[in-house]
């Protein structure tokens, strides 16, 4: 079934291309061309052209066959426009010229495509949102709860079997390109450029959509390069360069307590993150509505000075006024990070801050090779409530504890570990926590309710070295007993089960 639809999608694009090529060669056109200048549009960078564009669209859309709306070279001022379908045949919008937005911020999106099936938008032109004029009016950064985002440059709503390619998008007021309730859409060769400090100017934002492919895009902006919100299924992101920006993100999810949220099936491959505040990030609010994030694969990712290369943040709270005891109800599971290398610009290169209520599980780490050369400490990982396996190289390391002294009774075990989030009481553990591989890492959220301090409820079995490892996450969970005794030695995190 899936195969058939991919085949039909491919066939559709071949058709469109054949169509366009044959038409531009003027050898017996099967598609009809609708040139906006024939409708009175003027590309002199002065007057608004929205009425002329809309009339050209209406005719192209109503043509009972394949149509191409053409925007020739020139600079076209354009007030907000809505290109609405359904149309009667394949429709292509060829933007060869440059489009410039007005300062109108009353709309959700500047250029809107809605209810269109089999749409192609391309042409190599520039979509200039002229955001600098209004960025000072953005109010969503510090006020997430009640805010009105600035307009999206191009919004695709209920668009199916379509392709958006070869465009140069600059300085959107808000999100550059948004998909909402779309299916089978390919986005490729889109270049997005906005300043690093421009507010909420995400590159591509995808919500409630299915079977979306993003390929060969180059994104520099002031927020997430690619952002995936609730309701997405099967999103592929290949060959994308991101930076500056906030990385490739999922979320934030679960803000609305009454709504259930789900994002399943994400494949991110061969991407690079350069000078971004985050690399690969999943963020959920706490408390949150119920939800599921699952079946993610991140592979072959190059970090070039990302602040937080790998980060799961289930206590997302940008405004800093949240209850830090509250837990997220969004389950994150079956997430694989494979072949992630490069440079972290902060010491904590891997951070899993998962929910205590629904801990992350079935996480797989394979060949993680990150370096930190700064002055703020040594490379490390942090984890909380996460269970999984690791394979191959692990830099930062995790998963071992070196018990340097121990005893029974009060002050059972003393710990020399570096604890970041938890507070170490006296006389307790003295284990050098080493993340999930040999080396050094950070455990936190120690359980002080017991006469024993626990690491942060993280467990990663090393599948290569421990044949007896049982991948059932329930088997990896720490449990407490009173009066344990710990011989000196180095333990893998999962070994602790036998002791605690
Ligand atoms: C990886 O992505 C880059 C662009 O970021 C591209 O030039 C290169 O061809 C891609 N490699 C593969 C194997 O697809
Ligand atoms: C885990 O996710 C991968 C995709 O990354 C998928 O192929 C696999 O079937 C999933 N496993 C389970 C048990 O759902
Ligand atoms: C550790 O995680 C398990 C579930 O994976 C949970 O039942 C248990 O309460 C957690 N323990 C602590 C100390 O948070």
Image: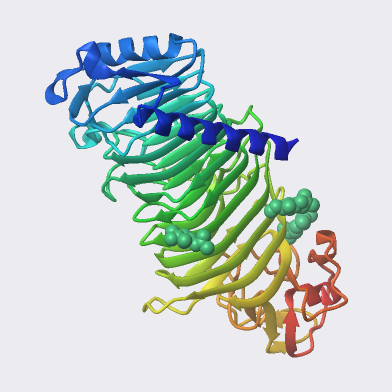
Q: Position of residue 166 (x, y in %)?
A: 37, 41
**Front-most of residues 263 and 384:** 263
- Camera sees residue 409: yes
Residue for point 32% across, 33% down: 139
75 vs 332, left or right, is left
455 vs 251, left or right, is right
- Camera sees residue 428: no
Q: Is residue 301 above or below residue 258?
A: below
- Residue located farthest toward the front when viewing the structure as drawn: 27
Query: Within the image, what quadrant is residue 381 found in?
Result: bottom right
Residue for point 43% across, 20% down: 31
Q: Quadrant of ligand 3?
A: bottom right
Query: Total marks drawn?
Result: 0
**Front-most of residues 24 and 497:** 24
> Which image quarter holds the C terminus?
bottom right
59 vs 464, left or right, is left
209 vs 306, left or right, is right
Q: Position of residue 238 (x, y in %)?
A: 52, 53
Residue for point 44% across, 70% down: 344
Q: Position of residue 321 (x, y in %)?
A: 45, 43
Q: Is residue 240 above or below residue 265?
A: below
Q: Position of residue 220 (x, y in %)?
A: 33, 51
**Front-most of residues 272 and 323:** 272
Query: Within the image, what quadrant is residue 468 found in?
Result: bottom right
């Amino acid at each position: 079934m899936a195969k058939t639809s991919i085949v039909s999608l491919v066939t559709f694009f071949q058709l469109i291309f054949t169509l366009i090529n044959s038409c531009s060669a003027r050898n017996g056109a099967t598609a009809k061309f609708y040139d906006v200048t024939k409708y009175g549009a003027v590309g002199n960078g002065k007057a608004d052209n929205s009425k002329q564009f809309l009339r050209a669209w209406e005719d192209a859309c109503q043509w009972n066959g394949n149509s191409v709306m053409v925007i020739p070279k020139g600079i076209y001022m354009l007030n907000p426009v809505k290109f609405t379908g359904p149309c009667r045949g394949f429709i292509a919008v060829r933007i060869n010229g440059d489009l410039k937005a007005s300062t109108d911020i009353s709309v959700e999106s500047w250029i809107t495509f809605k209810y269109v099936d089999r749409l192609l938008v391309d042409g190599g032109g520039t979509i200039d949102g002229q955001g600098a004029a209004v960025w000072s009016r953005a109010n969503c950064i510090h006020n997430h709860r009640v805010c009105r985002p600035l307009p999206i440059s191009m919004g695709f709503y209920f668009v199916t079997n379509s392709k958006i390619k070869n465009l140069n998008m600059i300085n959107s007021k808000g999100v550059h390109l948004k998909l909402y309730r779309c299916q089978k859409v390919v986005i490729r060769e889109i270049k997005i450029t906005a300043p690093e400090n421009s507010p909420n100017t995400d590159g591509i934002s995808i919500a409630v959509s299915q079977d979306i492919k993003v390929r060969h895009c180059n994104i520099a902006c002031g927020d997430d390069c690619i952002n995936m919100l609730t309701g997405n299924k099967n999103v592929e992101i290949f060959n994308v360069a991101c930076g500056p920006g906030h990385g490739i993100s999922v979320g934030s999810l679960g803000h609305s307590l009454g709504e259930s949220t789900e994002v399943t099936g994400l494949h991110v491959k061969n991407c690079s993150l350069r000078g971004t505040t985050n690399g690969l990030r999943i963020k959920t609010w706490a408390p949150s509505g119920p939800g599921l994030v699952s079946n993610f694969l991140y592979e072959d990712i190059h970090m070039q000075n990302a602040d937080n290369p790998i980060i799961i943040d289930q206590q997302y709270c940008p405004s800093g006024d949240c209850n830090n005891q509250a837990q997220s109800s969004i389950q994150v599971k079956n997430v694989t990070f494979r072949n992630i290398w490069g440079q972290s610009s902060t010491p904590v290169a891997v951070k899993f801050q998962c929910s205590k209520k629904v801990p992350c599980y079935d996480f797989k780490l394979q060949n993680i090779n990150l370096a930190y050369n700064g002055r703020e400490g040594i490379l490390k990982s942090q984890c909380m409530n996460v269970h999984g396996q690791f394979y191959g190289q692990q830099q930062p390391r995790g998963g071992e504890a070196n018990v340097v002294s121990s005893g029974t009774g009060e002050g059972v075990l003393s710990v020399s570990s570096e604890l970041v989030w938890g507070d170490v009481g006296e006389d307790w553990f003295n284990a050098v926590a080493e993340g999930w591989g040999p080396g050094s890492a950070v455990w936190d959220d120690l359980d002080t309710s017991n006469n024993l301090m626990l690491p942060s409820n993280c467990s990663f079995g090393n599948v290569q070295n421990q044949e007896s490892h049982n991948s059932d996450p329930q088997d990896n969970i720490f449990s407490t007993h009173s009066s344990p005794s710990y011989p000196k030695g180095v333990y893998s995190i999962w070994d602790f089960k036998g002791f605690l």
